[in-house]
Image (spheres, rainbow, N blue to C red):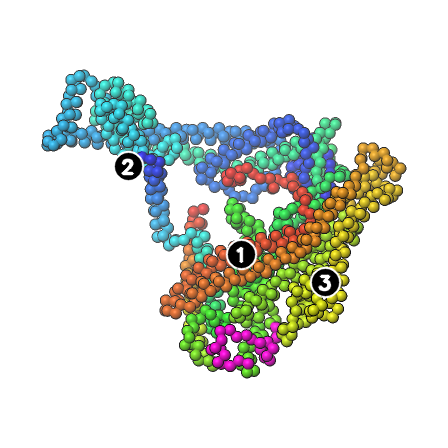
Amino acid sequence: MCSLLRGEEMCLAQLFLQSGSAYDCISELGELGLVEFRDLNPSVTTFQRKHVNEIKKCEEMERILGYLLREVKKADISLPERDVNPVAPLPKHIMSIMEQLQRLEVELGEVTRNKDKLQRNLLELTEYTHMLRITRTFVQRSVEREPLQAQYEEFPFLEKDTMLEYSSMQRLGAKLGFISGLIQRTKIQAFERMLWRVCKGYTILSYAEVEEYLEDPDTGEPSKRVVFLISYWGDQIGQKVKKICDCYHCHLYPYPSSNEERNDVVEGLRTRIQDLHTVLHRTEDYLKQVLMKASESVYTWVIQVKKMKAIYYILNLCSLDVTNKCLIAEVWCPVDDIPTLQRALEEGSRKSGSTVPSFVNRIPTNDAPPTLIRTNKFTSGFQNIVDAYGVGNYREVNPAPFTIITFPFLFAVMFGDLGHGAIMALFALWMVLYENNRKLKNTRNEIWNTFFEGRYIILMMGLFSIYTGLIYNDCFSKSLNIFGSGWSVKAMFTEGVWKIADIRGNRFLTLDPNVTGVFTGPYPLGIDPIWNLASNRLTFLNSYKMKMSVILGIIHMSFGVILSTYNHLHFKKKYNLYLVFLPELLFLLCLFGYLAFMIIYKWLVFTAKDSRLAPSILIHFINMFLMQGDGMQPLYPGQTGLQVFLVVIAVLSVPVLLLGKPVYLYWLHNGSNRIGMYRGYERVRRNSEEELYLMRAHDMEEGSGHSDLSTSGERPTEEFDFGDEFLHQAIHTIEYCLGCVSNTASYLRLWALSLAHAQLSEVLWAMVMRVGLRMDTTLGVLFLVPVFCLFAVLTVSILLVMEGLSAFLHALRLHWVEFQNKFYSGTGVKLCPFSFSLLPSSFEHDGLL
Amino acid sequence: MTNTDRSLTQFDQQQDSFLLEYISLIMRGLICGPKVAACGMVLSAWGVIMLAMVGIFFSTHSAVLFEDVPVTKDDLKDTDPPHRIYALYNKVGYNCFIAAGIYVLFGLFSCCQMKLNKRKEYLVH
């Protein structure tokens, strides 16, 4: 009950788990996600804990699973998307899973290695074929060239030179050797240069590029290669050439000495390549089969291993009983869930077939429990934005249920446009209607996830913006005339105030509401649409919006102060009500509440007829503090007296706020020694109902009487530090009083942002749409289409996204600072229940799942 | 040959395969991807509704839209009732309706693209 307002009541419980059924019980608890386990062995390192071997086994399995998932992903096999939720396997099943995984790993490793080897072989054979084919053209070319040599008389030197070299070498008995192979295209130039430098012309290099891309076996990328043929004289040159070829990572192949040999080799290669293709094909098919079979169960295994590891981790947090037969665990548990917890333990014991049941025992504690606030899909968004500032203390008032309405409302006040609000609401409605669509839920895009998580917030913001858009009468910067305007221009003519000549002669004319028929009554809902055509529109709207912002701010802040009474009453500090809450409220209302009253009074009492005599609220407010104002017309009879009274009350409430609480506590602590029945009196910082009750119970158990006050025993008396308390209260007073002024002014951002939004919207219409609408020519129609497209894009990007984020941020700031610092401390800790669904998976992190 | 050359050759090869794929897709009639088609549908829906409403407001000679009508000094001469200004209002109103009609066509086109995209997805998976 009242979980959203205040948070659940929590308790510390001890679980006594039988050793045999501990695993199953914790598995049950993990499925339920109820409780948070406390570490009972904080001084033990991870390697000294009891179940470290099991955790190592789990990690080994996770390693194999990671390898499997990577292979599956590489082979482009899609994992079946099933919503399976297998339970954690029993310890006896762990070995079988481990075996299966290891077997799979070995098999996959073998098959992959074989495949790589085959592919390398295939590559070599392909290269060899290319090489043979291309070097054949070298030989043919050089054979063709010989008869032509005699014709080139101009270049006799080169040709004759090589011929001479060849014949002279033959005479010297040097053998002509050939080295052929392939090299990467990027390296051929450097290779040629190196050959020339080293062998100084005793080699001839001819090369040609291979047209198709060959795969590099090491990197797997396709690259271009060049076939080369080096002919050299002499063995030493041959050694040098071989060394250079090694340097440049060439693939060398034996060069056939005759044409017949070449043809034989080519034939042989062709058959071998065909065979290899078939074998490779079969291997790939087999690999794919193995991976597909693995992929069916890999998802289940991942979840099972994750759960297992989590259970062993929790088992490590427990401590052993003295009899060594029972595990003790300490958990934080919501009080309402203790029956469920008991049932889960019984279920676990039953599953493990243990005869002795495990049970729960609630124990008293002085630590502050973590906070648990149960939310549903609607309230979780708002709770998140409150928690982003700070998680509430245990059983402190939670601002979230109020934020559900005030946050969209303040956003809408700053955003106030019917058209933009409608688009925002439609977008949010689409997200809400399709919230169960798997594709929308599981995207990894961070920005989209943020918007999707907040879809209910955006929906509320959109709906409220439609409402404020109606009030401001602003739809894409144009006003809607739904009910008929209350102003009539014609009446100025019929009453004879204006003449036709006046229109020609003046740029601006003022409608006078005091003339009969001009102003027939206020517009039923919102701002009159005629203001859209008025040149002094901003003057009117600014005054209206500023006053509205101040009134809204004062209401919001007063509400925050009133909420603090909930905390004072719940934590049984009634003195806070009189010494803190009352002075705060009086200070706020006497000064700023009176300002709001004056604003509303002026709106109601002064009409168009006495607009000349209407007083300035600001001047009156300032005079109130200066205790002046005799020269001015009072707003109402008795104003000066009332104002003096209010100022006096406000000024008097400051010292009460400053000194009241410390003095009272001092008196309570020192002046009433006889009454104190408890040792260690109220700790002034944290005080929960349970603590007091538990302390009392503890004391009564120990059998202490009030005569034992002097001997403190194990429990030292809590010192009441007057200086500390006084300083704390002084800071609070200064913060509050100065804060009232600055926070009230801070609410003026409601005016500022709504003005900015309205102006941006108007500028967009005037500069974009108007250009399209005003086109006179026949082609003007077609021009309107892209103009509207541009208008739409700019509206979404500037007015919806940019202004929306800006208004969101400012509304958030108003809540976090101006509203929450009146009552909320937000220094608590959130309950992190042990739940399998909340555990992150490292595979998801790597994008493998 | 430098590293840029090597990566350029890879790029060439990839470009060839992509070009073939694109051509086959366009032959089927699929021009935009699913996201572009969805944006097109949303934009045309918004365009139809908003331009139609603006057109209606122009046709009813709404005073708020006065500055969007291309009024010249001569048009302001006649007063009761200002026929020329009404005619101008109507003209702009018709322009809006025609633009709304064009957006209807655009919306149908986007709808077709969405259907083709859905079919392609259905075939692949």
Question: Residue A726 lies in magenta, yes or no?
Answer: no
Nearest the viewer among A815 and A9 is A815
Residue drawn at x 42%, y 65% is: A772
Question: Residue A518 lies in magenta, yes or no?
Answer: yes
Characterize the local packing of mark 1: few (<14), some (14-19) or many (20 or more) Cα atoms within 10 angstroms: many
Residue type of the residue flagged with mark 2: Glu
Q: Main secondary structure of the magenta part?
A: loop
What is the distance, in whole Å, between disc 1 and disc 2 at their CAs?
58 Å
Residue with the mark numbered 1:
A803
Is residue A234 visible in the rendered structure shown here? yes
Q: Chain of mark 3?
A: A
**Among the 4 quarters of the image, the one containing residue A471:** bottom right
- Labels 2 and 3: the sequence-earlier one: 2
- Labels 1 and 2: the sequence-earlier one: 2
| Numbered circle sitting on residue B52 | none
Residue type of the residue flagged with mark 1: Glu
Residues beneath discs 1 and 3 located on the same chain:
yes
What is the distance, in whole Å, between disc 1 and disc 3 at their CAs?
43 Å
SS at mark 1 in the image: helix
Residue drawn at x 67%, y 67% is: A600
**Magenta range:** A497-522
The mark tally for this picture is 3
| Numbered circle sitting on residue A627 | 3
Residue with the mark numbered 2:
A211
Q: Chain of mark 1?
A: A
